[in-house]
Image: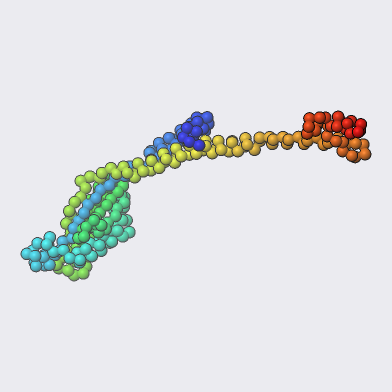
Amino acid sequence: MDLLDWIGILLRRWKLTVPLLLLALGGVGAAATVTPWTYEARANLVFLASPFQARQAGGNPWLVFDSSLTVTAEVVGREMMDDRTAAGLRGRGLTAAYEIGVAQDSTGPVLAVDVSGDDPRVTKATLDALVAEIPRRLTQIQVEEGVTERAQIKASVVTASPKAALAATGKLRVLVMALFVGLALTVAVPLFAEVLSERRRRGRAPDPEPAPAPDPAPEKPNGVTLPDLTGSANGESAGAGLVRRSRD
């Protein structure tokens, strides 16, 4: 069965094809209405060495990066992801989802903040709150350990989204999947119905009539079979041969 056969079946069974196609398009429209658009906002913060540690580099913290800064960034990121921080943000109406962790594309102490939500204003407000909270949480951790101000690690914002950007990939993926499933059903159901109909037609087809059996050779009344009178090998009839032998 090639493509032309499929098209012929779909056209022949239009009573199935048309409703299924309309249902598929309606499902895509419903998915487009129900599925919200997603907005994203991002920021990156770098952790810098304390003034006390930066003295070895002439007081420039950008010249001093060691593993302790990366470990500190990871600890702060984990603390920002705890349930208490998320609950505090939700209590302020900042309900956008977020993820904080050491940037995967960096070898240094860079903390990446990714925020996503269906409201661009809430998404941007959540990002701003997180960017402001990270340095405060970093300072709090060090104060609780009795670290003096000159020995404290600092966090500096490197990049931050000026506004939440529309991320259409997620919604478009949902719509494409819904359209694919709808079109697959639109094609598969009529083809399956055609296969079932063909099987039923074959099941109702009458069996071929058996060939008639050959007639048995005639017999004498006492059960002796009469000789074949259809002819002999030399063209003479069997009856003529019998008469000749009787005369001899």
Residue 52 in percent (x, y) is at 11, 67
Colour logic: rainbow
Furthest-bottom residue in this view: 146
Residue at horizontal 23%, vertical 56%?
105
Displayed quadrant of residue 239: top right
Residue 106 in percent (x, y) is at 22, 57
Q: Is residue 161 visible?
A: yes
Furthest-front residue in this view: 248
Residue at horizontal 27%, vertical 47%?
40
Residue at horizontal 25%, vertical 62%?
74
Q: How many marks?
A: 0
The one of 188 and 27 positioned closer to us in this rendering: 188
Residue at horizontal 22%, vertical 52%?
43
- Decide if residue 19 is on the left or right side of residue 61: right
The one of 208 and 183 positioned closer to us in this rendering: 208
Displayed quadrant of residue 196: top right
Image quarter (top left, top right, bottom left or bottom right) of the C terminus: top right
Furthest-left residue in this view: 58
- Decide if residue 156 is on the left or right side of residue 59: right
Residue 220 in percent (x, y) is at 90, 36
Q: Is residue 149 visible?
A: no
The one of 56 and 231 positioned closer to us in this rendering: 231
Residue 169 in percent (x, y) is at 32, 44
